[in-house]
Image: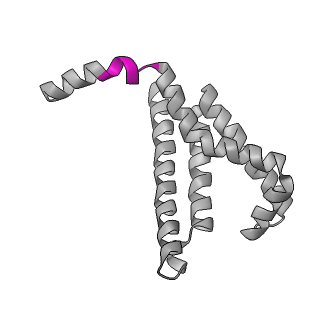
């Protein structure tokens, strides 16, 4: 490692290596899933409509599964209870949902396709983040 990198890392480590920063990072990673799960739980008719929109049947069953997955896996990550499993669950869910909902390649060229492509690749970034959480958690437990 380069001497400058070592010095900069030693300056950053007290703040960015702190446990509360790690928790904030986990909270940021899980924020959309907590919000989505709570919104679906409080507007179950809307959740059913979303499942129907994406062709998932029976829609009420899929809505309940998605609500449970989004909330339970997020809480597992935040609490550190089988964190790696919660991260893999949300990563897998995100990957499947991304290919289901953001098929930008099927859209005509234009702003809608551009926005869908951006969102598609942002979601792949979330998948990578969840893989990193699982990898780090499993390394720590080794």
Pick the quarter of the image with the N terminus. Answer: top left
Left or right: 132 in relation to 27: left
- Look at the picture and state if 102 lies above or below 27: below
Q: Could you say which quadrant of the image residue 49 lies in?
A: bottom right
Q: Could you say which quadrant of the image residue 81 lies in?
A: top right
Of residues 81 and 27, the one nearer the viewer is 27
Q: Residue at x 61, y 40 (%)?
A: 31
What percent of the width, then of the height, locates residue 89?
A: 62, 46
What percent of the width, then of the height, locates residue 18?
A: 44, 19
Q: Residue at x 47, y 25 (%)?
A: 21
Left or right: 135 in relation to 40: left
Residue most toward the front?
A: 111
Residue most toward the top?
A: 14
Magenta segment range? 12-18
Q: Residue at x 73, y 51 (%)?
A: 66
Left or right: 43 in relation to 4: right
Residue most toward the bottom?
A: 108
Of residues 45 and 99, the one nearer the viewer is 45
Q: Residue at x 39, y 24 (%)?
A: 16
What percent of the width, then of the height, locates residue 55?
A: 75, 71
What percent of the width, then of the height, locates residue 123?
A: 52, 55
Of residues 65 and 20, the one nearer the viewer is 20
Residue 13: tell me if it is visible: yes
SS majority, magenta: helix
Q: Is residue 107 magenta?
A: no
Residue 82: tell me if it is visible: no
- Look at the picture and state if 86 lies above or below 2: below
């Amino acid at each position: 490692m380069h001497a400058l990198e070592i010095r900069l890392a030693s300056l950053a480590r007290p703040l960015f290596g702190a446990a509360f920063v790690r928790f904030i990072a986990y909270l940021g990673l899980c924020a959309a899933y907590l919000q989505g799960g709570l919104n679906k739980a409080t507007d179950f008719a809307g959740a059913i409509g979303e499942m129907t929109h994406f062709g998932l049947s029976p829609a009420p069953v899929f809505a309940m599964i998605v609500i449970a997955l989004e909330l339970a896996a997020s809480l597992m990550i935040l609490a550190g209870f089988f964190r790696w499993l919660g991260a893999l669950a949300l990563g897998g869910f995100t990957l499947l949902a991304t290919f289901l909902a953001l098929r930008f390649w099927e859209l005509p060229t234009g702003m809608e396709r551009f926005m869908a492509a951006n969102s598609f690749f942002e979601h792949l970034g979330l998948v990578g983040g969840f893989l990193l959480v699982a990898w780090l958690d499993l390394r720590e437990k080794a």
